[in-house]
Amino acid sequence: MNETHEIELGKLLKKGLGPPDQELRRDLWPEMVRRMEKGERRVPWFDWALLAAATASLLFVPQMIPVLLYHL
Amino acid sequence: MELLERFARGEQDAFETLFRQFQSEVFSWIMRIVRDRGIAEDLTVEAFWKMHQAHARFDPARSFGAWARRIATNLAMDHLRKSRRETPLVGEPADGARENPGIQRETREQIATAFKRLSPKLRIVATLSLVEEVPHREIAEAVGISEATVRVRLFRATQILRKELEQLGAKT
């Protein structure tokens, strides 16, 4: 297969797909700010896992509570 | 201090300046791959979010545009992988395509079907090279592969597309 075939195929694809409108019609900065706020508020899964483990420990071994309070 | 150095240090105003400078370029690049305005806007924001998170790994001595394009291409590729069986590829028809809507619709459907059967990595190279006429060097840089690999993928994509289109009855 040579370059001519690629050009022919390219022409057909262009004809079929058409050029997309590539112009950005609005400023995306407000969405970027929302995305950053959302991202920064997100708590990593391991923090939730740690919290769950700590809660479970306190529930199943309540003797740990005074020890924990002593160390706080 | 230079803008890129300030961005790499995590300064928010530097990031905003770069966002405003490059948002159109990144959107346009993604649009050429995914050919859907809404998805391209979402992916543009997601690409800049990744850049924001990765600011410390950016080398200010290198091109921000090339780095942004690489990240955008990876996101577009992920999108193509996820939506391979769901999303139609075709965007708005070209001006010439509106002249003969009956034939054009059939051709568009055949081409969309053939494109859908390409793997995302072949589809990206085929779209950028055959349809958008992006030089192989730029495709290689954006996808993170060698120019030789671009040529191999283009060859495979061309073979598959020709075969698919012939089976579907479209003249190649």
Image (cartoon, coloured by chain):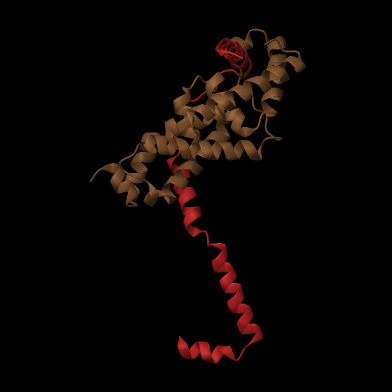
A13, B22: nearer the viewer? A13
Choose between B136 and B29: the one closer to the eye.
B136
Q: Quadrant of the N terminus of chain A?
A: top right
Considering the image in quadrants, where does the C terminus of chain A appear? bottom left
Horizontal and vertical percent position of residue A34 = 48, 49
The one of A50 and B60 positioned closer to us in this rendering: B60
Q: Where residue B17 sits: x, y (%)?
A: 33, 41
Residue at coordinates 63% horizontally, 87% vertically from top-left?
Answer: A61
In this rendering, does residue B36 appear at all?
A: no
Question: In this rendering, is residue B156 above or below A5?
Answer: below
Q: Is residue A55 left or right of residue B7?
A: right
- A12 to B80, vertically: above or below: above
Q: The red chain is which one?
A: A
Question: Which residue does the image show at 40% across and 35% down from the upper left?
Answer: B66
Task: Note the chain letter of the brown one.
Answer: B
Q: Residue at 65% x, 40% y: name it.
A: B82
Quarter of image, res B42: top right
Q: Looking at the picture, does residue B146 appear above or below residue B5? A: above
In the picture as drawn, the residue positioned furthest to the left comes out as: B1
